Amino acid sequence: MIDRLLAALEREAAQEVGALRAAAETEAARIAQDADARVARRKREALGAREAALRATVETAIGTARRTARRGVLEARERVLGRVFDAARAMFPAALASDAFRVALPRHVAEALRPLSDEPAVITCPAALGDAVRRETRGRKNLTVEIAPAARPGITAATADRIILVDNTLEGRLERLRPQLTVDVLARMTKDGSA
């Protein structure tokens, strides 16, 4: 009887060991599968984060390269515009003797004096314009024409107290027209394929 009891206990123990082993193997497989899934997820997350970081680095580098290229284009355009306006300024002294300037001078004088109304005023100009400006302003009361050897090409008009000053020199006119002239020059450069 003990032998049967021992055999039954051994069978039950063997069955229990088999069941525990099967449960342990199932649990171990589940744990291994969960671990594999976690490792795979972490790899995907790490790769995704690395890919996002690399994408951001590339986008930053592209943005920097575009800004650098754009800055280079803008600087080159500014150099060209500087040369264009410097060339225009270099022509100012000779322009005073041109027929076109002589024709425009009455308008320049009128434009310079308009804001001053009838207040006592002073027109300053280089010697080359002195006689022509005097002719244009003949008959105007409270007006003095000053000849200044160092005056810029063109005229300036000011109230006698110098509170109001109208710069109608060629340089002053160029500066007032510079924004529109810049647009025109750049449009021409683009049309000609220079920019």
Image (cartoon, rainbow, N blue to C red):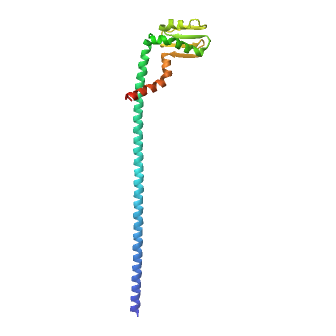
- Which quarter of the picture shows residue 70? top left
Q: Position of residue 144 (x, y in %)?
A: 57, 7
- Above or below, 14 against 174 in this view is below
User: Left or right of 31: which side holds 140?
Assistant: right
Image quadrant in which the C terminus is located: top left
Q: Position of residue 146 (x, y in %)?
A: 53, 8
Query: What residue lies at 57% left-to-right and 13% top-to-bottom?
Result: 113
- Above or below, 118 against 2 in this view is above
Residue 70 visible to an observer of this rendering: yes
- Residue 122 or residue 46, whichever sits in front: 122
User: Left or right of 126: which side holds 17?
Assistant: left
Query: What residue lies at 40% left-to-right and 92% top-to-bottom?
Result: 2
- Which quarter of the picture shows residue 189? top left
- Above or below, 126 against 71 in this view is above
Tally the marks.
0
Q: Position of residue 29 (x, y in %)?
A: 39, 70
Q: Position of residue 67 (x, y in %)?
A: 42, 36
Residue 151 visible to an observer of this rendering: no
Q: Residue furthest bottom?
A: 1
- Residue 6 or residue 47, whichever sits in front: 47
